[in-house]
Amino acid sequence: MEGGAVNRPCPVCGWFTPNYRPWTDKLIASLNALGIPHDVVEVPRLPGSWEANTMAKPAQILAAMDRHPERVVVFLDVDCEVKAPIDGLASITGDAGFYVRTRYRRFGGIRFGARSGTVVIRPTAAARAYIEAWTAAARQAPRGSVDQAAQMVAMGPRALVQLHDAGCRVLRHGRGQGSGADHPARQGERQRQEGKAQEAVGAR
């Protein structure tokens, strides 16, 4: 990637359906307060469940990449507020970055979970290939799956990096892990689906 692409402010991109307008307004206000460029688009709600609507995310990331060629794109869920500059996210070493949680199971094996609330994409062919694979995995997912399931299925042998806790904080029952920004509680299906585990961004 050319140096100019790194030095220019990376835009924050996202998408939302009309019912997410209240959260989107808060996100945009937080970005404006920090002078962070943004490109958050409204799209119609798709037929079907909330889970089915989440599967549109990788296609929306591809669209954002097309709107911002040769730029690092930070793609956020709109139900978060950015509390600090995010320039450091542009310097990731992999093609794509997102928050990952891992831990051992009590009786053997491990738990592995990728979060899609904050996704950083460099303008590389490998990054595009990954998002295209994620898009394809979303189309093939069984009913009831969410975008994070397709995200993990698409990983394969790719140059992906884990974002630090400072950039993405997971909140459980009102208590945060890491030092990122506060994230308002989601409601309805997503809150039940994620067990009240939320994400936030505020890279330092």
Image (spheres, rainbow, N blue to C red):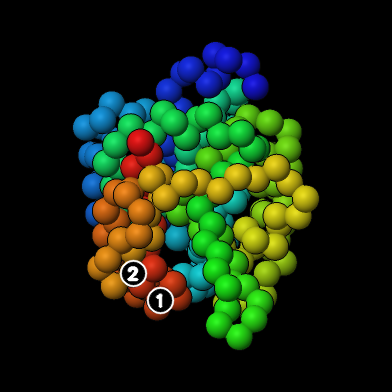
Q: Residue at x 48, y 43 (%)?
A: 75
Is there any visible trace of residue 38 in the rendered image?
A: no
84 vs 203, left or right, is left
**Which is in the foreground here, disc 1 or disc 2?**
2
Q: Secondary structure at mark 2?
A: strand
Residue 96 location (% of width, % of height):
61, 42
25 vs 60, left or right, is left
Asked if marks 1 and 2 touch (Cβ < 8 Å), the reply is yes
Is there any visible trace of residue 110 in the rendered image?
A: yes
Of labels 1 and 2, earlier in sequence is 2
Q: What's under tag 1, amino acid-wise?
A: Gly
* Vertical comparison of 132 with 195: above or below: above
Quadrant hosting residue 9:
top left
Q: Nearer the viewer, residue 17 or 184?
A: 184
Quadrant hosting residue 143:
bottom right
Q: Nearer the viewer, residue 173 or 186?
A: 173
Residue wearing tag 2:
172
Residue 160 location (% of width, % of height):
65, 45
* Vertical comparison of 128 with 157: above or below: above
Task: Quadrant for the N terminus, please.
Answer: top right
Marking on residue 195: 1
Q: Residue at x 29, y 36 (%)?
A: 84
Marking on residue 66: none
Q: Mark 2: few, some, or many residues within 10 Å (few <14, many ≥20)?
A: some
